[in-house]
Image (tube, helix red, strand yellow):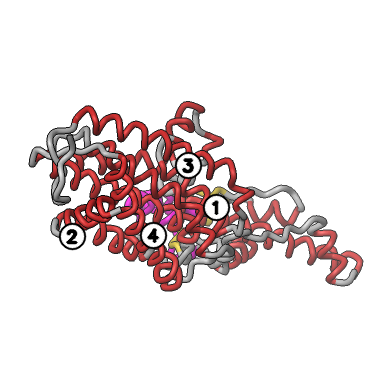
Amino acid sequence: MSRFLQAARGELRAIFTDRAVVLVMIGGSIFYALFYPLPYQAQVATGLPVAVVDHDGSAISRELVRWINATEQVEVTRNSPDILQVQDAVRRKALAGYIEIPHDFGRRVLRGEPAHIGVFANAAYIVLYSQVANAAASASLAFSRDIVEQRLLARDQRSPQASAALAMPVTVDLQELYNPDGGYANYVVPAVLILILQQTFLIGICMVQVGRREQGVVYFAPLVMAAQVCVYLALQCLLFGFYLLIVYELFGFPHLGSAGLALVAVLPGFIAVTLLGLLLGCLFASRETALQVMMLVSVPALFLAGFAWPAEAMPGWLVWLGRLLPSTGSIDVFVRVYQMGAGLAEIRGSWLGLWLLVLGYAIAALWVCRVSRHTGYLGTGYSQP
């Protein structure tokens, strides 16, 4: 046990006496967790500027414009007949899109004929596109319902409730499960927090291990590796607690699960991250290379995790590649347990998959470090044979 504690103390000394490692692993984990949610505090994009190109100019078309302007997603800031000028404003991002009303719009509505409007949203930015499209669709639907109600009332004087039922025979009551605000931050930040922990610790662990190798020291003893895993696991758990107790409360992210169960769910993922870092630390030639490669891997890890784009829509080989990264399984179990309120029985497959990663990375790390070892272990006071 004294050898285990000696190795743990040596690892802590190597971490906290290296300012670059502390800055990346501790500072980076805290800074990114606090900074990343800031742009998404509004949760949903509202009041986006749009233009209306009204070729009709009738009272009915102006009424539709008022319905569109009444939505919270967009604000009609320009009403211009010059479509080229409006298109130029969209290209300059002065507008999120525009609505074009044709010449015969009012006449077709009065005749009871189908009338169409054109909605042109900036699909190069998917959030802008979806908000403009949703605003135009909801306003048009409400406008159409209002027209039908007025016609029915004028025709046979039915009650408003009866006419509303005829105008809208099927209504939709949309409920945002596990994201009551329907906010972008509630969706993206929880997953990114796990990815932040993975990438900062992979970089920091690699920097520590490569730094030892640059001094001619490599080790492979299972007891020493177990001590290292415990040190990095403790640090990840502390930062994870900071995320749940401080970041979640500070930004008001919703959750249905308990922090204790969430920690149990992500525990094998944290161990796998540590073992992967120890494995990669035996392979990189310099600290700079480790930093560059790990930064390069961040973006693929983000997309392979299956939340930026659903895994069901990805090629099968990419799905399997993503499962080799601890972040993929960790994000899955964390979101399901902490945000959706699932139990361990419901995440059994992903959780066991993380433990398989732990086993695989442990075997690989021990073998690679044994092959690449030299003569001693830095800072522990003993040498490997």
- Image quadrant holding the C terminus, namely top left
Residue 23 appears in view: no
C-alpha gap between disc 1 and disc 4: 43 Å
Of residues 73 and 284, the one drawn nearer to the viewer in this rendering: 284
* Residue beneath the point at 37% across and 52% down: 85
Q: Which residues are magenta?
A: 74-98
The residue that disc 4 covers is 237
3 or 4: tag closer to the N-terminus: 4
Give the structural element (helix, strand or loop) at label 3: helix
* Residue beneath the point at 41% across and 33% down: 360
C-alpha gap between disc 2 and disc 1: 52 Å
Q: Amino acid at mark 4?
A: Cys
* Left or right: residue 87 compared with residue 28: right
Rate crowding at label 2 as few (under 14), some (14 to 19) or many (20 or more) other CA atoms within 10 Å: few
3 or 2: tag closer to the N-terminus: 2
Give the structural element (helix, strand or loop) at label 2: helix
Rate crowding at label 4 as few (under 14), some (14 to 19) or many (20 or more) other CA atoms within 10 Å: some
2 or 4: tag closer to the N-terminus: 2
The residue that disc 1 covers is 133
Q: Amino acid at mark 1?
A: Ala
Circle number at residue 16:
2
Labels 1 & 4 near each other (Cβ < 8 A): no
Residue 356 appears in view: yes
* Residue beneath the point at 20% across and 40% down: 290
C-alpha gap between disc 2 and disc 4: 17 Å
Q: Amino acid at mark 3?
A: Leu
Give the structural element (helix, strand or loop) at label 4: helix
Q: Residue furthest front?
A: 2
Dot in front, 1 or 4: 4
Rate crowding at label 3 as few (under 14), some (14 to 19) or many (20 or more) other CA atoms within 10 Å: many
Of residues 7 and 56, the one drawn nearer to the viewer in this rendering: 7
Circle number at residue 354:
3
